[in-house]
Image (cartoon, coloured by chain):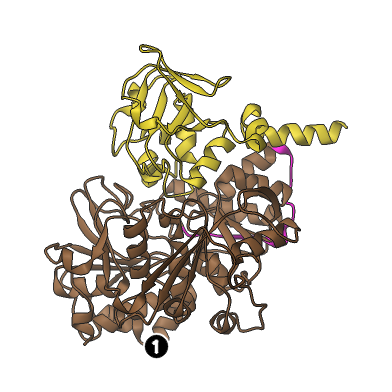
Chain colours: A yellow, B brown
């Protein structure tokens, strides 16, 4: 599961360009990161990890940005910090956004495994580990449920059956 | 002692006081959506849940991203919005009346003290009215529509104080580009940014809206200005005073002299690439764009016209006004005529080419100067296009000069 390393301030306009916003997520995902990594959507494999620097996901509220990354099978997003709105969107879709102070030490193409139990990223080749901040406790159940929609579905079902 | 942000959050959370960093659940007084992130996204999710909107009277829907429609997809998106508001019983629907952030307060939906969410990143615009307003994505909007509530990490406050008086030809856009250049796209740290000081208090409402709007580019969750007589005059009714307690602790307090601020320009591809206008005189755009929620309101059109009066643009000058009411007012006071005489081409009401959603986008290698809020790579068109951001004064001056130009040279 390789990493795709990007820089600081990766914005939602480059993650999912506006001109494709009128389409469904399948079409949008084909153009994911097109302005900075042409061909990304073809080369990426399920389980890959996208790594950013500071303020990953800056800009527009378009939820299609994390949704496209999730659609392509990205297992987790790792960054030194995330733009607040993007962070909420990613977790609301059940896509782990992991704050990792050492994110900039991760190199493009590294094989990386996410160990959620221990809150560490493991470099499969060197066995080096990078700690990430656990997902905030008040959002953990929602992320485990697969995101806000599934979480609400569960809650509403509980309400009608109880 | 609490800051304005903390007071607004405490009220919405039903608490006497709140502490920065704690997680609270807030009751939402108003939820705003547009055609792109709104009905077409939330309708299928509501249907999956078999849920209804918690309080249709608290929801406002405004079409702006895909109007005017230009193809089958955009027509479908707008049709879904029109049908859904009827089904959901939402009376607050503004169809092709302008950009959501401008139409919402213009139609009286925002008042000091409110707690509001918007399905768009520029929703902090509402903070100009001393309302806590911030942007959320479509699934989070679904959560609000179903429950009427949202969680929030109580923000710290970052105070940005501008003393003195802005020079003629310098505007809220220049203040904000300066701040983003100084503090970066994450300078706001997803906290509440409060704008204070004599230079801020002197700003008219639409200028305050520009400032709070671009708190998104500064990386704050919301941007706030205390309510005062200017707020009251805009709303034409008595308001409660909402302001920070004097001496309430803030995370940071930055002080600047508004009198010495010069017009700012942000180079491609980030609003954080901003510097004083003088550094860009060699840049020769072929398109000057006056549009968007931060650049084509009545106040913005008037700024542009004050420079363009009796002059001709030497490049393509595109104007996409921000609201129907502002167009009417600009027609009546002669602003539109000045723009027309200068050679402006008018686009339809709405977001225009700002987010690159519509039919008109910038082509390969086009260099543009624009009054919009962000210039990320490929946002307004081709990835090779180069967009410089500036105030309506500076964009108009550039259109006339043929190169990036300090508007103060033309306003003398």
Question: Callout 1: helix, strand or loop?
Answer: loop
Residue at (60% x, 56% y) in the render: B117
As drawn, is A71 to the left or to the right of B145?
left
Q: B181 above or below A28?
A: below
Residue A138 on the magenta span: no
Task: Name the residue carrying label 1.
Answer: B333
As drawn, is A162 to the left or to the right of A99?
right
Q: Is residue B96 visible to us here? A: no
Residue sitting nearer the eye, A11 or B103: A11
Residue interval drawn in magenta: B49-64
Residue at (43% x, 74% y) in the render: B207
Residue at (60% x, 70% y) in the render: B244
Indicate the position of residue A44 as horizontal and vertical percent values. 37, 22
Q: B351 above or below A47?
A: below
As drawn, is A143 to the left or to the right of B15?
left
Residue at (14% x, 68% y) in the render: B403
């Amino acid at each position: 599961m390789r990493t795709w390393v990007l820089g600081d301030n990766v914005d939602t306009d480059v993650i999912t360009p506006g001109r494709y916003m009128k389409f469904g997520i399948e079409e949008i995902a084909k153009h994911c990161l097109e302005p900075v990594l042409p061909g990304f959507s073809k080369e990426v494999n399920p389980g890959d990890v996208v790594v950013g620097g500071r303020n990953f996901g800056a800009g527009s509220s378009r939820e299609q940005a994390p949704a496209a990354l999730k659609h392509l099978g990205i297992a987790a997003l790792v960054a030194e910090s995330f733009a607040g709105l993007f962070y909420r969107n990613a977790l609301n879709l059940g896509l782990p956004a992991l704050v990792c102070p050492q994110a900039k030490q991760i190199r493009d193409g590294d094989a990386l495994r996410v160990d959620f139990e221990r809150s560490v990223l493991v470099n499969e080749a060197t066995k080096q580990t990078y700690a990430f901040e656990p997902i905030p406790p008040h959002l953990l159940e929602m992320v485990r449920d697969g995101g806000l929609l599934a979480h609400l579905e569960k809650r509403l079902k509980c309400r009608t059956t109880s | 002692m609490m800051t304005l942000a903390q007071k607004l959050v405490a009220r919405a959370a039903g608490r006497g006081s709140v502490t920065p960093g704690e997680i609270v659940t807030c009751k939402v007084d108003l939820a705003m959506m547009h055609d792109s992130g709104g009905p077409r996204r939330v309708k299928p999710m509501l249907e999956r849940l078999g849920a209804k909107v918690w309080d249709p009277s608290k929801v406002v829907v405004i079409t702006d991203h895909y109007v005017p429609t230009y193809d089958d997809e955009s027509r479908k998106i707008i049709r879904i919005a029109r049908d859904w508001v009827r089904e959901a019983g939402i009376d607050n629907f503004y169809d092709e009346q302008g950009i959501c952030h401008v139409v919402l307060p213009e139609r009286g939906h925002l008042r000091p003290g409110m707690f509001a969410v918007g399905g768009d990143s520029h929703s902090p615009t509402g903070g100009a009215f001393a309302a806590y307003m911030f942007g959320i994505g479509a699934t989070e909007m679904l959560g609000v529509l179903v429950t009427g509530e949202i969680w929030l990490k109580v923000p710290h406050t970052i105070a940005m104080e501008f003393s003195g008086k802005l020079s003629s030809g310098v505007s809220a856009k220049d203040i904000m580009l300066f701040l983003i250049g100084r503090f970066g796209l994450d300078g706001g740290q997803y906290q509440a940014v409060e704008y204070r000081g004599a230079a801020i208090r002197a700003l008219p409402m639409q200028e305050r809206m520009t400032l709070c709007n671009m708190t998104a580019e500064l990386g704050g969750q919301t941007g706030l200005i205390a309510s005062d007589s200017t707020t009251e005059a805009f709303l034409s009714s008595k308001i409660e005073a909402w302001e920070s307690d004097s001496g309430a602790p803030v995370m940071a307090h930055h002080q600047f002299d508004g009198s010495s601020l010069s017009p700012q320009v942000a180079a491609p591809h980030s609003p954080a690439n901003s510097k004083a206008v003088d550094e860009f005189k060699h840049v020769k755009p072929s398109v000057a764009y006056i549009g968007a929620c931060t650049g084509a309101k009545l106040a913005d059109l008037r700024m542009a016209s004050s420079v363009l009066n009796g002059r001709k643009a030497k490049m393509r000058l595109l104007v996409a006004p921000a609201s129907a009411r502002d167009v009417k007012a600009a027609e009546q006071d002669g602003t539109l005529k000045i723009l027309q005489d200068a050679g402006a081409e008018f686009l339809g009401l709405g977001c225009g080419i700002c987010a690159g959603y519509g039919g008109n986008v910038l082509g390969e290698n086009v260099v543009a100067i624009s009054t919009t809020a962000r210039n990320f790579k490929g946002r307004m068109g081709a990835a090779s296009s180069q967009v410089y951001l500036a105030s309506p004064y500076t964009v108009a001056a550039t259109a006339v000069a043929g190169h990036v130009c300090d508007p103060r040279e033309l306003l003398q």
